[in-house]
Image (cartoon, coloured by chain):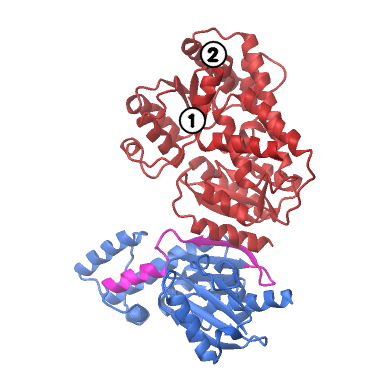
Chain colours: A blue, B red
């Protein structure tokens, strides 16, 4: 059995696969690097798979917290693992857009699913899950309900500030002036979409475009991004664990080569 | 091997402790020192005056005072230089030469006289149109003007022979460094990215003649050893500079070898040699005219991209690493042009946005590692 662990900034994911590439166990825990999150995710995935740690033949860790995690056999970056996971789940994918809690990345794949180029934004919260968390807090709505809220929008409010901190002030002013929460939610989705589309344009967005990462669960963002890039986006099943799936696939591959 | 380690260690110490090294050099040679802001300055004339040209390439100083004169969104090297000047760290220099290759440098030139009044300023304006006769006439006039300044500071007249001897010494340095950078692919373990950088950087803080002799000795010792094999990734690195330790360590950890560079702090200083004919000042001027592929020197034909492609091909490199100095307009304006050319040539590129002070290197490390995984 092979274990892939993805330790992100806001969540930890674990996936266990067998040699037939079947997912035996998976888990997402909403705490990330520097917490007990990674271990909890591994334990939960093992429980689901009905396995003990000793039955894991090889493990790969990826994500922001990979360097300090010392219980895996190898560490590989999230660019490589997300690409591998997305290419496996969606053969034919040529562009992977991954929006996480604290960063956004766009990865271009060649026709064989190998990374050809990538671009990341990890310094600025704009265009990441963090921006949506801030907006959700101001709108007094759970992050998981932001998309449903925006479904009832009858107008798109433009959030002109790119910076999350300034955007927060701008949104508060708009709400104070009577703007509808639904419309602001839609505006927040568009703001993320514009930022990520801009990032992606630096390496080009070749179809088929797939989306991974936690923000892919937000249908409002996906729709806004589709409109922004002018292309269909396929959200991979279980988008949050794609990095961990990629890591598990690499665990299997590396282990086979070592034999 | 011991002698190699000794020389490398000494040069690394020099690069890591510039002020100490310059003061030691001043004591050793009995010479005054003149600070030289990036990027190209009349070092040969300073040397001909019997003084030490000292490179001022920022450092790891925290910014407190420089905010008075420079906004946060400008080149970190220059902000740190101003900070160091205002803190009195340049007080031992007899003067500072500030050329005006970009808007930030122009502003610093204006502000220096009030921000750092204790350190005498010699501004120098290089021509934009450096390939036309008028540009050369103008540049030679500028050289004559600053020559008088250096003569006053040094208290001696600079003769044509002084200039020719100085140019000969600097040309020897340039040729030596060209051989050195070419040697890296043969000794990629000993001359890893970090060591290579520190050896090159040490040149700014020592007497050039003494430095060149040291590098020649190092190369002679290295060539006695068998070539080193490393299953690494060969890259050409471009930008203003590739520092700090955290950045260079990430390259070393990912077995990336700098088989060539197009860095303003490194090869751009020595890849173009002076012509062999003309007066000394004409030779200095025409060296600037002949130096192409640098974002800081106006190039109508935009040869930067082709230069990078040629470096990749000649050195069998796997890709290009762009170390984009944050807020550097000249470099940022060149990037889209050469990016397109490199992509058309099928050359993989890694883009890193860097600053002089990078307190968190994790993001950089992830990008470098991802690029290594992509290439392998």
The quarter of the displayed image where residue B214 is located: top right
Chain ID of residue with mark 1: B
Mark 2, residue position: B144
The reply, left or right, for residue B86 in relation to residue A238 is left
Mark 1, residue position: B20
The quarter of the displayed image where residue A4 is located: bottom right
Residue A226 among those drawn in magenta: no
Residue A181 percent across, percent down from the top left? 27, 75
Check residue A211 in the rendering and tell me which mark sits there, or answer none. Answer: none
Q: Is residue B333 visible?
A: yes
Residue density around tag 2, few if under 14, some if 14–19, many if 20 or more, within 10 Å? some
User: Is label 1 in a helix, a strand or a loop?
Assistant: helix
User: Is label 2 in a helix, a strand or a loop?
Assistant: helix
The reply, left or right, for residue A36 in relation to residue B201 is left
Kindly indicate whether the residue at mark 1 contacts the one at mark 2 (C-beta within 8 angstroms). Answer: no
Q: Is residue B75 visible?
A: no
The quarter of the displayed image where residue A203 is located: bottom right
Are callouts 2 and 1 both on one chain? yes
Q: Which residues are magenta?
A: A109-138
- In the image, residue B289 sits, relative to residue B366, either above or below, namely above
Taking the spot 59% from the left edge, 62% from the top edge, the residue there is B370
Residue B284 percent across, percent down from the top left? 62, 21
Taking the spot 50% from the left edge, 66% from the top edge, the residue there is A68
Q: Using the image as rendered, state which of residue B103 and residue B263 is in the foreground.
A: B263
- In the image, residue B37 sits, relative to residue A81, either above or below, namely above
- In the image, residue B278 sits, relative to residue A69, either above or below, namely above
Residue A135 among those drawn in magenta: yes
Residue A133 percent across, percent down from the top left? 34, 71
């Amino acid at each position: 059995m092979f274990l892939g662990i993805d330790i992100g900034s806001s969540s930890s994911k674990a996936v266990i696969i067998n040699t037939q590439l079947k997912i035996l166990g998976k888990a997402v825990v909403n705490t990330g690097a520097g917490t007990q999150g990674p271990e909890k995710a591994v334990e939960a995935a093992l429980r689901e798979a009905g396995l003990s740690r000793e039955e894991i033949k090889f493990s790969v860790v990826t994500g922001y917290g990979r360097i300090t995690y010392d219980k895996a056999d190898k560490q590989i970056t999230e660019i490589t693992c997300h690409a591998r996971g997305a290419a496996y789940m969606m053969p034919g994918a040529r562009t992977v857009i991954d929006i996480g809690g604290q960063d956004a990345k766009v990865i271009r794949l060649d026709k064989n699913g190998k990374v050809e180029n990538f671009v990341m934004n990890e310094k600025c919260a704009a265009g990441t899950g963090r921006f949506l968390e801030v907006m959700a807090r101001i709108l007094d709505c759970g992050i998981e309900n932001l998309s449903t809220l925006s479904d009832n929008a009858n107008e798109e409010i433009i959030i002109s500030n790119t910076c999350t901190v300034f955007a927060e002030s701008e949104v508060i002013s708009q709400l104070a002036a009577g703007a509808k929460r639904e419309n602001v939610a839609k505006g927040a989705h568009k703001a993320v979409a514009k930022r990520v589309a801009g990032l992606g344009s630096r390496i080009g967005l070749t179809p088929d475009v797939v989306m991974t990462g936690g923000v892919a669960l937000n249908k409002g963002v996906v729709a806004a991004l589709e409109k922004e890039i002018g292309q269909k986006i396929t959200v991979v099943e279980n988008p949050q664990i794609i990095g961990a799936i990629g890591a598990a696939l690499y665990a299997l591959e590396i282990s086979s080569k070592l034999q | 091997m011991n002698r190699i380690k000794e020389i490398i260690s000494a040069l690394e110490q020099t690069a890591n402790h510039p002020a100490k090294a310059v003061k030691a050099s001043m004591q050793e040679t009995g010479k005054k020192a003149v600070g030289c802001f990036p990027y190209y300055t009349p070092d040969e004339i300073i040397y001909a005056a019997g003084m030490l040209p000292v490179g001022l390439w920022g450092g790891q100083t925290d910014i407190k005072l420089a905010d008075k004169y420079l906004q946060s969104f400008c080149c970190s090297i220059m902000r740190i230089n101003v900070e160091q000047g205002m803190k009195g760290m340049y007080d031992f220099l007899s003067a500072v030469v500030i050329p005006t290759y970009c808007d930030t440098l122009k502003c610093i030139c204006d502000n220096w006289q009030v921000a750092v009044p204790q350190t005498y300023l010699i501004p120098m304006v290089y021509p934009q149109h450096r390939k036309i006769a008028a540009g050369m006439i103008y540049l030679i006039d500028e050289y004559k003007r600053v020559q008088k300044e250096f003569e006053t500071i040094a208290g001696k007249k600079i003769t044509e022979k002084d200039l020719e001897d100085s140019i000969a010494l600097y040309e020897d340095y340039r040729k030596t460094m060209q051989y050195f950078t070419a040697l890296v692919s043969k000794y990629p373990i000993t001359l890893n990215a970090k060591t290579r950088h520190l050896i090159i950087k040490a040149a700014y803080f020592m007497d050039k003649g003494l430095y060149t002799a040291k590098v020649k000795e190092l190369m002679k010792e290295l060539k006695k050893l068998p070539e080193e094999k490393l299953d690494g990734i060969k890259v050409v690195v471009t930008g203003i500079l590739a520092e700090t330790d955290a950045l260079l360590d990430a390259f070393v950890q990912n077995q990336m070898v700098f088989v060539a560079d197009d860095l303003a702090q490194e090869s751009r200083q020595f890849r173009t040699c002076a012509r062999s004919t003309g007066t000394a000042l004409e030779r200095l001027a025409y060296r600037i005219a002949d130096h192409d592929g640098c974002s800081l020197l106006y190039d109508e034909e935009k040869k930067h991209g082709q230069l990078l492609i040629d470096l990749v091909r000649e050195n069998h490199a796997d890709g290009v690493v762009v170390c984009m100095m944050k807020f550097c307009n000249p470099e940022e304006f060149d990037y889209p042009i050469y990016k397109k050319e490199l992509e058309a040539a099928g050359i993989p590129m890694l883009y890193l946005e860097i600053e002089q002070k990078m307190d968190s290197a994790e993001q950089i490390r992830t990008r470098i590692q991802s690029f290594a995984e992509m290439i392998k």
